[in-house]
Image: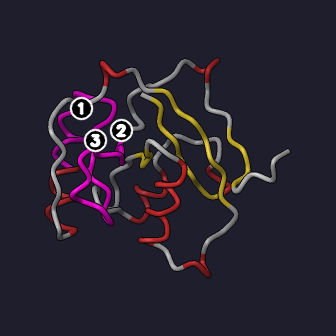
Amino acid sequence: MICYRVTPEPFAQSLAGTGARRHGGRWNRKGTAVLYTSNSTALCLLEILVNVRQQYLPAYHSMVIEVPDALVDPADPVFFPQVEPSREHGEQWVQQNRWVAMRLPPLFLPQAKMPSIFCSTPTIPILPRSNSPRACRFPSTGA
């Protein structure tokens, strides 16, 4: 599985889940580190726009992260229209510590047949250090 991430510049080389730990997210509470990724850069941006006011968007960087399919939770994705049940589900998933990533339905299109948001536990190594993700400024200038 190939995952994409769009993140502010200070976190462009990090897979630690710091922002989600500090602020909480749709699938986690404050204090729990998770890494939000997607199967496309475009969907990453749409998720940001759903959750952040445009005037607050800093310069973001995108990265590609490869997660072996065998490490992705095979369970069917679950959609919760409210935030708290989503967080509870995410917290339980993180505590189980069985999978590197789980598939989630996008917030703005929950009925999508192919879920495309991924939540990862940053405490489980995904890649060897020699293959750490490369980040590039987003949007790309074409250079």
Residue that mark 2 sits on: 121
> Quadrant location of residue 114?
top left
Q: The residue tagged with tag 3: helix, strand or loop?
A: strand
The image shows residue 14 at horizontal and vertical percentages of 58, 42
Q: Residues within 10 Å of mark 1 (few under 14, many from 20)?
A: few
Amino acid identity at mark 3: Arg
Compared to 20, does 50 lie above or below?
below
Q: Which residues are magenta?
A: 91-120
Local crowd at mark 2 within 10 Å, few (<14), some, or many (≥20)?
many
Q: Secondary structure at mark 2?
A: loop
Pinpoint residue 47: horizontal percent, then vertical percent.
43, 62
Q: Quadrant of residue 87?
A: bottom left
Q: Is residue 128 magenta?
A: no
Is residue 42 depicted above or below 48 in this figure? above
Circle 1 residue: 97
Q: CA distance from mark 3 to mark 2?
A: 12 Å
Q: Which residue was labeled with disc 3? A: 103
- The x, y position of residue 10, in whole percent, is 67, 54
Residue under the point 61% across and 27% down: 132
Q: Residues within 10 Å of mark 3 (few under 14, many from 20)?
A: many
Q: Residue at x 34, y 56 (%)?
A: 31
Q: Earlier in the sequence, mark 2 or mark 1?
A: 1
Which of the two discs, 1 and 3, sits closer to the camera? 3
